[in-house]
Image: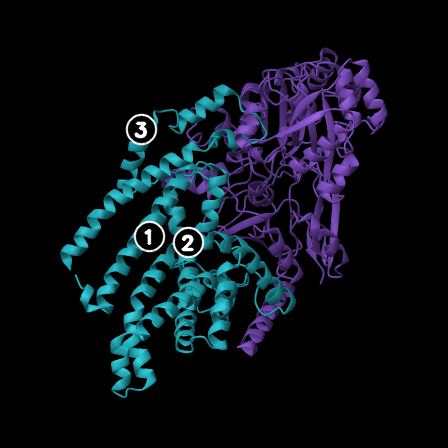
Amino acid sequence: MRKTLAFAAALMAATVLGGVANAKTFVYCSEGSPEGFDPGMYTAGTTFDAAAHTVYNRLLEFKPGTTEAEAGLAESWTISDNGLEYTFKLRPGVKFQTTEYFTPTRELNADDVIFSLERQLKTDNPWHQYVPGTSWEYFAGMGMPELIQSIEKVDDMTVKIVLKKTEAPFLANLAMPFASIMSKEYADKLDAAGTKEKLNQQPLGTGPFTFVGYQQDAVIRYKANPDYWGGKQKIDDLVFAITPDASVRYQKLKAGECHLMPFPNSADVEAMKADPNLKVEEQEGLNVAYLAYNTTQAPFDNVKVRKALNQAINKEAIVDAVFQGAATPAKNPIPPTMWSYNDKVEDDAYNLDEAKKLLEEAGVKDLSMKVWAMPVSRPYMLNARRAAEIMQSDFAKIGVTVEIVSYEWAEYLDRSKAKDRDGAVILGWTGDNGDPDNFLHTLLGCEAVGGNNRAQWCNEEFNTLVMKAKETTDVAERTKLYEEAQVVFKREAPWATIDHSLSVVPMRKGVEGFVQSPLGDFAFDGVDIVE
Amino acid sequence: MFRFLLRRLAVLIPTFIGVSIIAFSFIRLLPGDPVALLSGERVMSPERHAQIMHDLGMDRPIVIQYLDYLWGVMTGDFGRSVVTKEPVLRQFLDLFPATLELSVCAIIFAIVLGIPAGIFAAVKRGSYVDQTLMGTALVGYSMPIFWWGLLLIILFSGMLQWTPVSGRISLMYFFPSVTGFMLIDSLISGQEGAFKSAISHLILPTIVLGTIPLAVIARQTRSAMLEVLGEDYVRTARAKGLSTFRVVGIHALRNAMIPVITTIGLQVGVMLAGAILTETIFSWPGIGKWMVDSVSRRDYPVIQGGLLLIAAIIMVVNLVVDLLYGLINPRIRH
């Protein structure tokens, strides 16, 4: 038995490694199954990795490793003086993929762009509900239905999008997965065959990898797209081996059964770094975890009380205990990888004496408060209860009694929105499009009070700055406005900013050309294996 | 016999309706709704939330929703997943063969080792062999599946590299799924080494999933055998001068099998519960993992449909077990 097993293992190792060497197959041990293959319909990063970043492209693409949007399927664009009309010139000669299920007869043109976006925008579009129950969640979540007036075809290679109001982050939105460009010719063929749903099962786009097949909850296979406009890939095949458990992913990586894995257990990272066959890349994620006070309720409507509490939180201790160091303490509401991050802002230092003094000045004695701890682990906060306990003991040192409360996740999200909520809430955010607006306006703007603005904080000075930044398309000017807004934020302290977590990506030593995305995507365009 | 079958089938109908009511109402008792979870931290406007609830038919009175659902089920429509938008029945049928293949292997593993171990322990009652076997069975029975699985992976896949870490077959093999059973499909594919690879992937999950049933079957066999071995007819058989093998293997075993078969039947339910953890550890694409995900996402149609289908399977297995009694013991023939 033992011999047979050993033989089987040897045979397997030989086939796997041999296969990798000959056909250059890159295996990614992904953390979960995609919900489907139409990126517009879903919101999960797992789905975007499997569909949007492999098969599809967008008008604009995020420059690898940054949150800057650059030319993608649109070669260039112009914005009208009033900031309402965006005219995109499409890249000529872009071919759609040829697969077993479809052979394209034409190249990318304006019809494809209009099809891809209008099906999400117009409720009477025949593709709006091509799969029953589709809600185009991200398109709606980014406010696109209220923003877009019309999408027009100027000529075959030119598309004009007219907005109802000025919105500078619009360009970045177009680089998001939901704005992936599909083939109208393929969709028409599916429609004619009465199999519209296949658009979500057998994707076809212009991206670096061609879809080969998906075995539910097990494996997704792609091959390099030989006609890719960005050049052919160095690897021949790309395989997603779906492996939900982080410890098992690690074992597979160690055994050479995959080349790269996402989301390791933080306890395993040290051992991974010590393994001579592996390397670990770290980058600050595009996220923030915070403690949001309810700034409309006494005594938290007093900035001195908020400042006092902020000074009593030992962020270093939280980062060590919760992340084993795989995070950095946060001072601004936006992460350092984002443009316009104001490094000049000084954080509220951990100073218990100063905190006590501030509380005295505010006339607050024997304060007892609730701290809400999320029931789930999120990338920006792995263990909210642990963080809350650290705050509890910190606050006790300045005479503040803390009761930790928690609810089931959906309930937590819902109840924490209430304007008359009792207590400060631990929550966080992961950026969508890399635009500071997506943090500063979405989470702290006056419009978001009673919604995403868990601090219920509406500050005129701050709000004016972020609204102004939304309306101008000049990046330098926007940067200045956001930098100023961060100063106001720190002064007024609606949140205690807790941390920005690091995204840690372990891979085999021979993996080259993988560029971590600050947006948390896993894209394998340009990856190579030298082993 | 036929009337018995009809009677048993008639009982299945109210049981099935009972399960459907429980599945339908319990999941709705949990706080949080699936639509709110779709958007996560991104707050959905109340109007939009109401609109989507309406589109999904979740704003109707619960009784209407239930009746509508029940009607759908009777016509073979289990609804669509709120998350993936795929039909529940199709997803179930896609994933179930993987669970079935693993469960069958695990139960065979448990029976093949469990029954002889139980007999052996009973015959050698009180000896070191008995104590060692039953002690091991107790440990096996108490083993948390998750920990046990990881332990085996680290030892056999990580350190010794004898078995693959997870999955159903090496990624090098790629062939269309014909039956959904990897062992069969790999044979049909004709690809060299595919069958071997499928077997090697089955070894660890089979052991992990089969451990608890193995322990239960061994213990049950032992106690049933002990009881039977003390019966008069066994003494008579011995007195007749029959060999120990015939006494134990034929006279005693057949009578001892009734409670053991009941136990094996009940293990099917345990197996499906154990599959949830085993499948998660071994990245085994079956219904266990699918159900767990659906609970955390409040994917009502999947939870309801999954529970109903699993309950139906358990009911059918129990029926088969009842019929098997008659085959083994003529006195219980219907």
Tag shown at residue A232: none
Q: Is residue A131 visible?
A: no
Task: Locate residue A331, reporting x and y percent.
Answer: 78, 29
The numbered mark, 2 or 1, whose residue comes first in the sequence reads 2
Disc 2 residue type (three-letter): Leu
- Which of the 4 image quarters holds residue A529? bottom right
Marks 2 and 3, how far apart at CA? 30 Å
Q: Secondary structure at mark 1?
A: helix
Look at the picture and state if B166 lies above or below B77.
Answer: below
- Contact between marks 2 and 1 (CB within 8 A): the answer is yes
Left or right: where B296 falls relative to A452: left
Q: Residues within 10 Å of mark 3 (few under 14, many from 20)?
A: few
Q: What residue is disc 2 on?
A: B272
Residue under numbered circle 3: B63
Q: CA distance from mark 2 to mark 1?
A: 10 Å
Q: Colour of chain A?
A: purple
Chain that is coloured cyan in the picture = B
Q: Which mark is residue B313?
A: 1
Q: Marks 1/3: CA distance?
A: 26 Å
Q: Position of residue A503 (x, y in %)?
A: 70, 43
